[in-house]
Image (cartoon, rainbow, N blue to C red):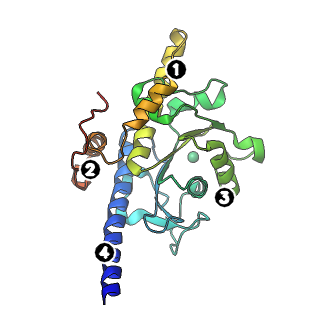
Amino acid sequence: MKEFFWRYLNAGMNKTTLDAVLNELVLANRILANEGVVDAYGHVSVRHPTKPERFFMARMRAPELVERGDLMEFGPDGQPVSDSRSPAVERFIHGAIYEARPDVQAVVHAHAEEILPFGITDVPLRPVIHSGSFIGRNVPVWDIADNFGDTDLLVRDMSQGRDLARCLGNNNVVLMRGHGFAAAARSVIEAVRISVYLPRNARVQLAAMQIGKYKPLSDGEIAARAAGYKPYSTQTWRAWEYWANRAGCGHMLGERPVSDTKKTEGG
Ligand code: MN
């Protein structure tokens, strides 16, 4: 009886967590579209909260239009779990990053124009503004041609995905030469945050390079920014709430987290 009770309770809790996570994923789709990070293409995924070898991502559809019913569940091989709808071709980016990085809970892939120059030149993209600190000190560039020769540049299978994940390593962002970027984070909110500020950071760096020598954030500054960050703090929620409302999705927001710190963030 007791065992049954606990199993029942756990099942209930899991459902709540899953529900919240999927709701967040729909919101992330809408926010990334509204902030201009994705257009008809690009996608965001989240790791399954209780089956860590699986992840969720929308079927092949523009992120701005994604609804709860569009979300599909994928296995570790990037193949849909009992779902016959058309998945996004490049789901292997997500599958391979989850496989390589147990710490990663959410992944974004997009083609934001501002970052593309840094994938086709030898100038590294560096965090140059405080809100860009989350992209991390190193942003490696992956060139699909290195190991796969002439392709259509899309990540079409797990071997290409794993090659990309190897290049990402322990970094937060990897640029994809002539194509876009992939960002890996500890939560959906964090993945969205990195992806929104990544193009802005790139734009500022490019502008600075036209004026003269630029100064990136120091390692200590990057570490100090990262140390104060919590994915579900009230400070983080401030941005999430703002983005959701701007995207016309304020009604989909979950519960505001209880204030857990007096530390201010963002300025
Ligand atoms: Mn792509």
Q: Identify the secondary structure beneath mark 4.
A: helix
Image x and y of residue 233, in percent: 29, 45
Q: Which of marks 4 and 3 is nearer the N terminus?
A: 4
Q: What residue type is labelled 2?
A: Cys
Q: Distance between the residues labelled 1 and 2?
A: 32 Å
Q: Residues within 10 Å of mark 1 (few under 14, many from 20)?
A: some
Image x and y of residue 184, in percent: 51, 46
Q: How far apart are marks 4 and 3 (CA)?
A: 34 Å
Q: Identify the secondary structure beneath mark 3.
A: helix
Q: Is residue 191 above or below residue 198?
A: below
Q: Which of marks 1 and 3 is nearer the N terminus?
A: 3
Q: Which of 83 and 51 is in front in this view?
A: 51
Q: Quadrant of residue 175?
A: top right
- Left or right relative to 134: residue 3: left
List the residue tagged with mark 1. Answer: 206
Q: How crowded is mark 3: few (under 14 residues within 10 Å), some or many (20 or more)?
A: some
State which quarter of the image contains the N terminus.
Answer: bottom left
Q: Which amino acid does label 4 sit on?
A: Gly
List the residue tagged with mark 4. Answer: 12
Q: Which amino acid does label 1 sit on?
A: Leu
Q: Identify the secondary structure beneath mark 1.
A: helix
Q: Identify the secondary structure beneath mark 2.
A: loop
Q: Is disc 4 in contact with disc 2, using a CB cutoff of under 8 Å?
A: no
Q: Earlier in the sequence, mark 1 or mark 4?
A: 4
List the residue tagged with mark 2. Answer: 249
